[in-house]
Image (cartoon, rainbow, N blue to C red):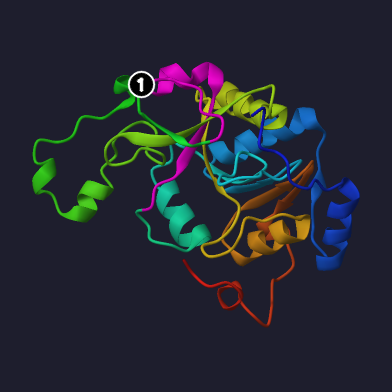
Amino acid sequence: MQGAYLGPEYSSLDTKIMARQYVAVYEKYNEDMLYDMVAGLLDKGFVVGWHQGREEWGPRALGNRSILGDVRNKEMQKKLNLKIKYRENFRPFAPSVLIDDIKSNFEAGYSSPYMLLIDYVNEKRRNPLPKNYYSLPIKEKLYYIRSDMPAITHLDYSARVQTVHKETNPKYYKLLESFKKRTGYGIIVNTSFNVRGEPIVCTPEDAYKCFMRTEMDYLVIGNYVFAKDKQPKWTEKRTWRAEYALD
């Protein structure tokens, strides 16, 4: 395989039509400014919905229909679970990492473009367990900060890794490069753009609805950026919980 971006793609006109329908407020950025601006949002702890190009075809969101966050943020895992995915707060999240930086972050350091393989956080990035770790209450064990990338480090220091390659997803690669330039980390949290029980978003309308139904902070569709605090009040007669059976 040479990539999983085989689903539908939407134009700027589609985004504008959606925005007009929902009276949505947005700002348009050129590509040179977009990546640095979004990297800055992630660096500040904001959660960003990222809708770009063709939808992924397969079991994983791979940077075209993704919700993104900062791997370094100690509260990011809880925030994504409780305020966006609406599921148990201990569920783990996967990292997207520049292929160039895979070995500095993970032990085996193999290519994993489809987020299907497990690797272990590099020893130098780990925090040693306290001597009384195994006698701690379960919640304290769960939330012990195991590495300098707590949002993606599982209990056993493992992670389900996606390596990002310039050849297959240049936009996502540039975003990670911008984040690395700003923070020193060429790695971010990547989870599928949906809530629990809902299929992954496809259209710009799907993305905006999911954005407004959750506590996501920003939505980026192509070069258009929607800030939550600038949107009109969201009201609907029926909630998404009634539309989709929970898993």
- The spot of residue 208 in percent (x, y) is 71, 59
- Which quarter of the picture shows residue 178? top right
Decide which of 43, 106 is in the foreground and name it: 106
Residue visible at 76% across and 55% down in the picture: 203
Residue 29 horizontal side relative to residue 169, left or right: right
Task: Decide: few, some or many residues near mark 1? Use Cα within 10 Å; few <14, some 14-19, many ≥20.
Answer: some
Q: How many marks?
A: 1
- The spot of residue 247 in percent (x, y) is 46, 66
- The spot of residue 73 in percent (x, y) is 43, 41
Decide which of 231, 89 is in the foreground and name it: 89
- The spot of residue 162 in percent (x, y) is 52, 32
Residue 161 horizontal side relative to residue 10, left or right: left
Please tell me whether mark 1 sits on a helix, a strand or a loop.
loop
Magenta region: 91-114
Residue visible at 77% across and 27% down in the picture: 32
For the N terminus, the quadrant is top right
User: Which residue corresponds to mark 1?
Assistant: 107
Which residue is situated farthest in the front direction here?
1
Q: Amino acid at mark 1?
A: Glu
Decide which of 214, 90 is in the foreground and name it: 90
**Residue 96 belongs to the span the image colors magenta:** yes
Residue visible at 23% across and 54% down in the picture: 139
Which residue is situated farthest in the bottom direction here?
237
**Residue 74 belongs to the span the image colors magenta:** no
